[in-house]
């Protein structure tokens, strides 16, 4: 879709908002379709992929996951209960701080992350190849907006 109307006028803010909303809904739908096929929900996926991306062998503390995902630790705790029941993560006590727990992926969790990553990449590539400069620019725009997310908004 073009960033201009047929008469070469720039899109107005409300038109950009509509396009953005439609795009985000479609991207969420693509993600949810893949996740449903693996019997996991988005919050579970966000936690699993965050642990995986950390690359830390000892895992992540619950608070680290919460900060990375910009949510409260209580939200993460509930999600971790579900992931533990599905045998996708393992929790261990931090020997330096017995109140803290480290979360690591199990073999099943690692396999699931690889499978979902592959399917999501394939789904996205059907729309825009990851090497496409347009896609890279879009990701940069998303990052900029994510960085300002902690600033108060007036709605």
Image: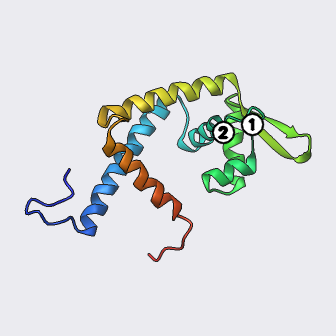
Q: Which residue is mark 2?
A: 54
Render colour scheme: rainbow
> Residue 38 placed where, x, y %?
52, 28
How packed mark 1 is, by other alpha carbons closer than 10 Å (few <14, some 14-19, many 20 or more), is many
Q: What x and y, as percent, mark residue 42?
A: 53, 42
Q: From the image, tell me which residue sits under label 1.
A: 59
Find out whether the residues at labels 2 and 1 contact each other: C-beta distance under 8 Å: yes
* Location of the C terminus (image quadrant): bottom left
Of all residues, the one furthest to the bottom in this rendering is 154
Q: Which residue is painted at 20% across and 50% down in the image? A: 1
Residue drawn at 42 percent across, 35 percent down? 33
- The part of the image, by quadrant, that contains residue 19 is bottom left
Left or right: residue 146 compared with residue 47: left
Compute the Cα span from label 2 to label 1: 8 Å
Question: Which residue is drawn at the image coordinates 47% and 26% (left, top)?
Answer: 118
Give the side of residue 130 with respect to residue 19, left or right.
right
63 w.r.t. 111: above or below? below
Name the secondary structure under disc 2. Answer: helix
Give the residue at x 36% y 35%.
131
Compared to residue 76, the image places residue 35 above or below, namely above
- In this rendering, the answer to whether 100 lies above or below 16 is above
Q: Earlier in the sequence, mark 2 or mark 1?
A: 2
Front residue of 143/38: it is: 143
Instruction: Please rate how many residues cluster around mark 2, counting C-alpha atoms within 10 Å: few if below 14, some from 14 to 19, many from 20.
Output: few
Q: Nearer the viewer, residue 35 or 23?
A: 23
Q: Secondary structure at mark 1?
A: loop
């Amino acid at each position: 879709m073009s960033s201009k109307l047929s008469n070469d006028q720039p899109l107005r803010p409300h038109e950009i908002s509509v396009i953005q909303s439609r795009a985000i809904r479609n991207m969420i739908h693509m993600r949810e379709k893949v996740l449903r096929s693996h019997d996991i929900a988005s919050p579970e996926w966000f936690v699993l992929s965050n642990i995986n991306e950390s690359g830390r062998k000892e895992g992540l503390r619950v608070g680290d996951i919460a900060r990375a995902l910009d949510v409260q630790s209580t939200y993460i705790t509930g999600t971790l209960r579900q992931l533990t029941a599905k045998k996708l993560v393992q929790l261990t006590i931090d020997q330096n701080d017995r109140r803290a727990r480290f979360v690591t992926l199990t073999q099943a969790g690692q396999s699931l992350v690889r499978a979902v990553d592959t399917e999501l990449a394939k789904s996205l590539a059907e729309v825009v190849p990851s090497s496409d400069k347009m896609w890279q620019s879009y990701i940069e725009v998303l990052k900029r907006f994510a960085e300002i997310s902690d600033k108060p908004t007036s709605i």
